[in-house]
Amino acid sequence: MLQGYLAYDDATTQKRPGVLVVHEWMGLNDYAKMRADKLAQLGYVAFAADIYGKGIRPQSPKDAGALAGKYKKDRPLLRARVKAALDVLKQNSLTDQARVAAIGYCFGGTTVLELARSGAPVAGIVSFHGGLDSPTPADARNIKGKVLVQTGADDPNVPPAQVAAFEDEMRMGKVDWEMVSYGNAVHSFTNPASGNDNSRGAAYNEKADKRSWEAMKQFFAEIFK
């Protein structure tokens, strides 16, 4: 049983673009729901997916690492879970099925990239400080939509070698892709709960948070026009 979170403006019954939101490694929590609410305020139908399952919410970084690792090691399972969420979003009566995108944070960034690599019919995906590695880089040729990756230039979880491999993957797959690297930003730069100590490898960066959200809005304006 998976339990997601749906957000939309009920002031109108008109169809509108849908955006799937995938959570960080701590699971579907208030942070992911806040992002869905913000997208609803922008005029989208937003569905925050639940990859782990109803009531499965890690209580520590150790537990979160184990859960996230389970899915990162089993990409077909990860793709199946996120596709189930995409199907729910597309089936909503308010969603314009021809205009759907997906965004994800940290673990969720990895997840939406896998959704794209699976050949899912999404107009675009946005990864915020997500992992970029792929055990099947040739799958990039399946990507149908545009890709926007937003990463911290100093993120220890996304080292230069991983960035270079991802760039090669995108080129080989002939993908319409873009990467924005934020200076002085480490992992989890969009989440205020990450604190502000860059030396820990994960920290909030207000500038990068605001800039990356604006970049996403501009990206959506292009793919949903």
Image (tube, grey):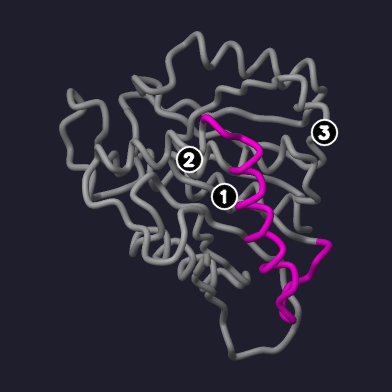
Occupied quadrant, residue 126: top right
Magenta stretch in the rendered image: 73-98
Reading the image, the residue beneath label 3 is 142
In primary-sequence order, the first of circles 3 and 1 is 1
SS under mark 2:
strand
SS under mark 3:
helix
CA distance separating discs 3 and 1: 18 Å
Q: Is residue 35 above or below residue 77?
A: below
User: Is 110 situated left or right of 92 in this image?
Assistant: left
Reading the image, the residue beneath label 1 is 103
- Residue at 25% over, 49% down: 192
In the foreground, 23 or 7: 23
In the foreground, 2 or 32: 2
User: Is 26 situated left or right of 125 in this image?
Assistant: left
Q: Local crowd at mark 2 within 10 Å, few (<14), some, or many (≥20)?
A: many
Q: Position of residue 56 (x, y in %)?
A: 37, 59
The secondary structure that dominates the magenta segment is: helix
Amino acid at the residue labelled 3: Asn
